[in-house]
Image (tube, grey):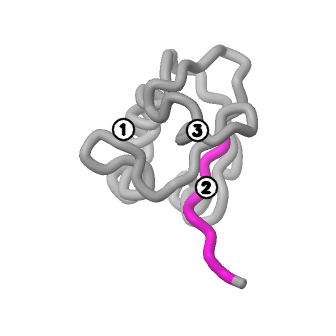
């Protein structure tokens, strides 16, 4: 898993291998929030749905897949980054 910008700062790392079982993106995100706390979570979930962060599984945006119900396989690559603005 790879984190960018603010999420990298909160987690204190750029990458990590997630060894806890997670069948879906939603399970993974809830596990990350449990590990890194509400400051991390405020970027990920709101009222049971995706919030601000962009979550990619193998380079594909989960909003174009099954959102939180997107299934995960053990070798999937998950990338999470907060929204980016600028010009």
Please name whichever residue, 6 or 58, is drawn nearer the observer in this view of the structure. 58
Q: Position of residue 11 (x, y in %)?
A: 54, 52
Quarter of the figure that contains the N terminus: top right
Numbered circle sitting on residue 34: 1
**Of circles 2 and 3, which is in front?**
3
The secondary element bearing badge 2 is classed as: strand
Can you say whether 47 is above or below 66 in the image?
Answer: below
* Residue 10 placement, left or right of 35: right
Q: Position of residue 12 (x, y in %)?
A: 59, 55
Residue located at (49% from left, 22% from top) = 24
- What type of secondary structure mainly makes up the magenta span? loop
Residue located at (54% from left, 19% from top) = 71
Residue located at (46% from left, 58% from top) = 52
Please tell me which of labels 2 and 3 falls first in the chain. Answer: 3
Can you say whether 19 is above or below 32 in the image?
Answer: above
Q: Residues within 10 Å of mark 1 (few under 14, many from 20)?
A: few
Numbered circle sitting on residue 64: 3
Residue located at (72% from left, 84% from top) = 87
Mark 1 to mark 2 CA distance (whole Å): 18 Å
Please tell me which of labels 1 and 2 falls first in the chain. Answer: 1
Which residue lies most toward the front here?
64
Q: Which residues are magenta?
A: 79-86
The secondary element bearing badge 3 is classed as: helix
Mark 3 to mark 1 CA distance (whole Å): 26 Å
* Residue 35 placement, left or right of 80: left
Residue holding disc 2: 81
Q: Residues within 10 Å of mark 2 (few under 14, many from 20)?
A: some
The secondary element bearing badge 1 is classed as: helix
**Of circles 3 and 1, which is in front?**
3
Please name whichever residue, 40 or 58, is drawn nearer the observer in this view of the structure. 58
Mark 2 to mark 3 CA distance (whole Å): 16 Å
């Amino acid at each position: 898993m790879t984190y960018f910008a603010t999420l990298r700062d909160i987690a204190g790392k750029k990458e990590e291998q997630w060894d806890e079982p997670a069948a879906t993106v939603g399970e993974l995100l809830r596990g990350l929030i449990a590990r890194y706390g509400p400051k991390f979570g405020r970027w990920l979930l709101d009222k049971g749905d995706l919030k601000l962060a962009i979550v990619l599984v193998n380079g594909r945006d989960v909003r174009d897949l099954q959102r939180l119900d997107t299934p995960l396989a053990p070798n999937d690559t998950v990338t999470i980054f907060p929204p980016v603005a600028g010009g």
